Structure formats: structure tokens, C-alpha cells
């Protein structure tokens, strides 16, 4: 979703072949998340940093080792719809800045398993 990479890719270095294992540590820190974002996404105006942070947080929650901690699909859908709405041109930049700081704080407080 964020990286543009396949879930399993034998053409990548051995420690990067399994996308979940490789990307999981990057999802808990904003600076690290930016390193794994697909360059094609970075070239466009959208998605915004807010959308990227929110997507990373959602992905991190979905990858939790304890299945009971996974968000229900209804919540996943709701979050994806919110991400889409964040990148609509109708969202004010002032609102985006407030959300960005909130999500930045949230993603940097995620515990790594």
C-alpha cells in the first residue's frame, strides 16, 4: 500500500524479501516511514504526509502479532475512507497541520513488538 513492493519478492536482498518482516520496524516512526514510501507516491501532491502517517498506523495495527488486536474490517474501511477524505482538496491546510501533529505524536508512541 505504501511501498509499492510485492509481499514476497525473491529478487530483493534476502533480509528484504518478506515485506511484512522488512517494513514493520519502519511503521513505528515518521522518519522511517518516509524512507519506505513508494517514490511514485512522493512525486505526486497526494497522498499528503497526514495520509501516509495514518496509513502507516493502520498497517501497523493490522500487522499486530496478536490477532485479537487487529482492527475489525469495518474500522479498516472507515480509516481508509478517512485517509481518502484527508487528501481531498476540500480539507483546509490548517486542519491538515493539526491532524499531522496529532498523528506524528501518535505514530512515534507506537510500541514496537
Image (cartoon, rainbow, N blue to C red):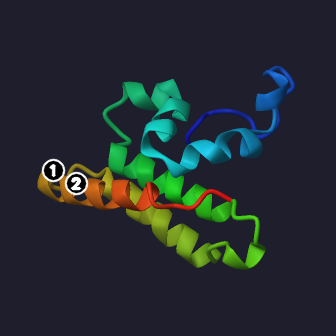
Q: Where does label 2 land, which residue?
A: 96
The image position of residue 18, as x and y in percent, is 80, 38
Q: Nearer the viewer, residue 91 or 96?
A: 96
User: Which percent across, then down, holds residue 30?
Assistant: 43, 44
In percent of the image, x 85 and y 26: which residue is there? 14
Residue 17: assigned label = none
Residue sitting at x 82%, y 36%: 8
Give the total of numbered labels: 2
The residue lying toward the viewer, choosing from 44 and 58, is 58
Task: Please report contact status of discs 1 and 2: CB closer than 8 Å, yes or no.
Answer: yes
Can the viewer see residue 1 in this picture? no
**Circle 1: element type:** helix
For disc 1, the marked residue is 93
Element type at marker 2? helix
Q: Residues within 10 Å of mark 2 (few under 14, many from 20)?
A: some
Q: Is residue 39 left or right of residue 8?
A: left
Image point (46%, 35%), residue name: 34
Amino acid at each position: 500500500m505504501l511501498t509499492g513492493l510485492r509481499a514476497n519478492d525473491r529478487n530483493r536482498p534476502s533480509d528484504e524479501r518478506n515485506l511484512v518482516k522488512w517494513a514493520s520496524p519502519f511503521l513505528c516512526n515518521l522518519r522511517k516511514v518516509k524512507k519506505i514510501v513508494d517514490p511514485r507516491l512522493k512525486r505526486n501532491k497526494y497522498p499528503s504526509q497526514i495520509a501516509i502517517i495514518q496509513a502507516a498506523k493502520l498497517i501497523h495495527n493490522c500487522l499486530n502479532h496478536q490477532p485479537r488486536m487487529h482492527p475489525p474490517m469495518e474500522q479498516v474501511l472507515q480509516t481508509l475512507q478517512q485517509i481518502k477524505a484527508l487528501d481531498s482538496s476540500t480539507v483546509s491546510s490548517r486542519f491538515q497541520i493539526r491532524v499531522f501533529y496529532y498523528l506524528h505524536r501518535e505514530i512515534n508512541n507506537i510500541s514496537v513488538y
